Image: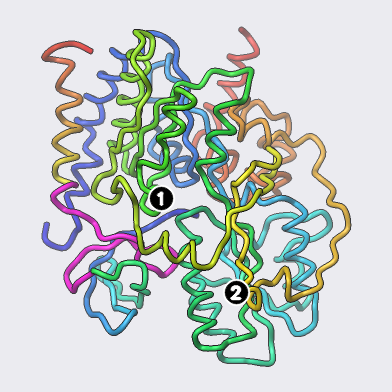
Amino acid sequence: MCLAVPARVLSIEGMKGAVDFGGVSREADLTLVPDVVVGDYVLIHAGFAIQRLDRSEAEESLALFRELARALEEDGP
Amino acid sequence: MSDAPYDLHGFRSPEAAAALVERIRALATEPIALMEVCGTHTVAISRFGLRSMLPGTVRLLSGPGCPVCVTPLVEIDRAIAAARIPGVTIATFGDMMRVPGSRSSLEAERARGADVSIVYSPAEALALAAEDSERKVVFLGVGFETTSPAIAATIVEADRRDVRNFLVLPFFKRVPPALEELARVPGRRLDGFICPGHVSVVIGAAAYEPIAHRHGIPCAVAGFEPLDILAAVAALAKQARGRSEGRPARVENLYRRAVTTRGNRRAQEVIDEVYVIGDAEWRGIGTIPGSGYAIRERYAAHDARAALDIDVPAPREPAGCICGEIMLGLKLPGDCPLFGTRCTPRDPVGPCMVSSEGSCAAFHRYERVEAVRGAMDREDR
């Protein structure tokens, strides 16, 4: 029910926009993400963009997860 | 990879997952019980087989994370009754179709000629209403904070365009009050909440601080890839260790690519504009103070509960179903005598089996052997 899928914003017209789900284009409502610009990745839920995805945070999380796992080798739990 | 929001494969790396599992094994030397409260987590945990990867000391409970499952039977009956009113079109997300009411279902009503449309977005329901002003289009407003702002924004839009025949039957639920209620359930241990990622997109990670501070239960906001969930389990296992050494519980945000501390302000404003917080009944659990949204007086013209006179007889709960105990974390699907025999996804008895995101449906689809074996193990003890 709370499934939300990342998509890239292709174009914006007023409060609506075209978004691309890895090759499939659909219209999405952008009312809830007023600052979004073309090229941003957003999370789409029930036809509405609910958040802009932060690519640098994604990379940091991955690094953190790897570090979390590695901490074991270095200093135990 | 230029055409992906981020390195998705990185979040599914088997090597990194194995390393995290080892980390969890080292941390969880004592038994811990963690609960997810999100149907999408329920499905991800089952689909990626995470339960079977974890050490035996870590018990993953499946809480009331499916909005369809926690919608009271009387409200399902109300939706079915609305479908029978001449001139009414029901517009709904697909997972409400097969939920058995006391005496019928929306699917059965449609087969009998009722006008029931499955929509992907509330905006589609508004479009249906705008196309045919003679019909009343009733959208079933089921969902947590992830979904309620989209529906609120649609109500504002309907009001702005004066589409008077667009109505919403509100069944909205708020997650944090439910977590507070779950924190108080006696008779089972609970060492942490895996907090719902997309609810948190809207409400922000800080919304769980009362759970950590007031109830002493660690919280980890998690995304939906295997590494996201395993990292949350590792973080909570680490906090559980800290708790045993007297450190306070806290909220950790492990889904920073989508979740901020304060959440989506615009979505919160739309929620405030259209809804007012009220008590709500959760199926199998009971009434939880402040856990629902009603539509404000200002938008009452779009409130199906006010606009339609829907009379529903007393609901008949299915006999033998233990969905309530499962959602409270007291039992797992394999503990139910109906599971996989009388109650299956094809012919569901209870709400946790009917929605694909319900605990029982996820267990049935992905973990049936484990579910039954787990129940047998517990009986042996």
Q: Is residue A42 magenta?
A: yes
Name above or below for residue B23 compared with residue B80.
above
C-alpha gap between disc 1 and disc 2: 23 Å
Q: Quadrant of residue B250?
A: top left
User: Which quadrant of the figure contains the C terminus of chain A?
Assistant: top left
Image quadrant where residue B326 sits: top right
Residue drawn at x 63%, y 45% is: B353
Q: Position of residue B289 (x, y in %)?
A: 64, 43
Considering the numbered disc 1 on the image, is that residue within a helix, a strand or a loop? helix
Q: In the rendered structure, find residue B299 and report the number of the disc placed on it.
A: 2
- Which one is nearer the viewer's eye here, B288 or B74? B288
Residue visible at 23% across and 69% down in the picture: A36
- Residue B269 located left or right of residue A9: right
Q: Which residue is mark 1?
A: B203
Colour style of the rendered protein structure:
rainbow
Point out residue B76 in the picture as x, y percentages from the top left corner.
Answer: 73, 58
> Tag 1: residue type?
Ile
Q: Which residues are magenta?
A: A36-57
Task: Kindly give the residue lying farthest to the front in the view shown.
Answer: B298
Residue B296 rendering spot, x and y as whole percentages: 60, 67
Disc 2 chain ID = B
Camera-nearest residue between B258 and B26: B258
Mark 1 or 2, closer to the camera:
2
Residue B112: give its label: none
Say what amino acid the circle numbered 2 marks. Answer: Tyr
